[in-house]
Image (spheres, grey):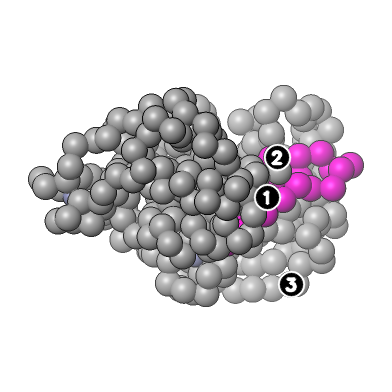
Amino acid sequence: MICPVCKGNCIRAAEEVLGDVETRYLSCSRCPPEPNLSKSISGRLLPPKVERCPSCGRAALDAVMLDALRLLQSFGLRDKDDGLRSVGSPLIDVGYPLAYSPRLSRGSLILVGERYSAEAAEAMVRDIPEIKGVIQSCGVPGVVDPKRKPLKNLLLAGCDLRADVVSSLMGELVVCKRQSLIHIEFPRDNAPKMRILEELYFQGKLRDVADGLCGPGTLGLMCVLAGAQRVVFNDAWLPAVEDLLVNLEVNRGLLGIEEIELIESPQGMVGSDPVLLARARGACQIEVYHGDLCRLFSRARPAGLCLIDHFPGKDTRALQQACRCCKETVIV
Ligand SMILES: [Zn+2]
Ligand SMILES: [Zn+2]
């Protein structure tokens, strides 16, 4: 599968991602010890560089962040007293809850932060082998408030496609996302939502499901994995639905998908009247809509269970009202 961002082969099938995630970030027997650099002290007190492992070639996370700090300093974007914390937030390319600091291989880290420049970002991707992409952060991407223009973070260089491993009692899935366009969730953020899904699963309610604000598809895909007969996905934010289409392909084998059929073309980045973008057939009937959830069920057949996973703290009354044609609505 071709990556929509870098046009390379950075997207792997879910089976492959799940097959090596346990060992992906481990050190080898000859890796030098963890450098444990302080994140808060001045850059003047840090070494100029930390070497990679001569055997496996992997780098400690600190080594990569230190290289990024030195590079930003050379571009005049950080001063001599700025430390590692000023560099930004590191995101590993396969999101997985780790109990240890990761050892990084080529192209396995995406950096999100502020005060970068396009030139410095290009240099980071070119000269620091572990860095896959650099994102200038602007806030939470997506349609947070329908009345305001959606925010986008800016991909300055490289590729921002990441894969998160999502687990529940129903099994494991891989959820890819273009991280400059989809809000950042850490593996632990998904856990409470998975507990809610597990509860619904044991009540036998994951049969005919709508994932009303689906994002890249985490909840609805888990319902497919749990054996649902029909899952309707919907989101107003086009990049989210596009990433969901990638995820149907990535998880095709795990979800028993036989055929994915593209139906209609999207109308703009933020959808209003629901458009049926795609249908997938196989173990489960899948429909993918791009549009405003308030109007979804004027087009799609109402579901037995409608899941609404909104941005935290947002008022969901209007959405619940619009989805009352479904047998049950659950705010996740
Ligand atoms: Zn890519
Ligand atoms: Zn090593």
Q: Which mark is residue 264?
A: 3
Q: Is residue 105 above or below residue 263?
A: above
Coordinates of residue 48 in the picture (x, y in percent): 36, 43
Q: Which mark is residue 153?
A: 1
Q: Identify the image quadrant of the C terminus.
A: top right
Q: Assess whether residue 254 is covered by the magenta stretch.
A: no
Q: Nearer the viewer, mark 3 or mark 2?
A: 2
As shown in the figure, which amino acid type bears the numbered disc 3? Glu
Marks 3 and 2, how far apart at CA: 31 Å
Q: Residue at x 69, y 35 (%)?
A: 310
Secondary structure at badge 2 equals: loop
Q: Does residue 200 appear in the picture of this structure?
A: no
- Going from N to C along the chain, the mark reached first, 3 or 1, is 1
The magenta region covers 140-157
Q: Residue at x 61, y 46 (%)?
A: 77
As shown in the figure, which amino acid type bears the numbered disc 1? Asn
Label 1 crowd (10 A; few <14 / some 14-19 / many >=20): many
Is there CB contact under 8 Å for labels 1 and 2?
A: yes
Q: Which residue is mark 2?
A: 139
As shown in the figure, which amino acid type bears the numbered disc 2? Gly
Marks 3 and 1, how far apart at CA: 27 Å
Q: Is residue 7 above or below residue 125?
A: below
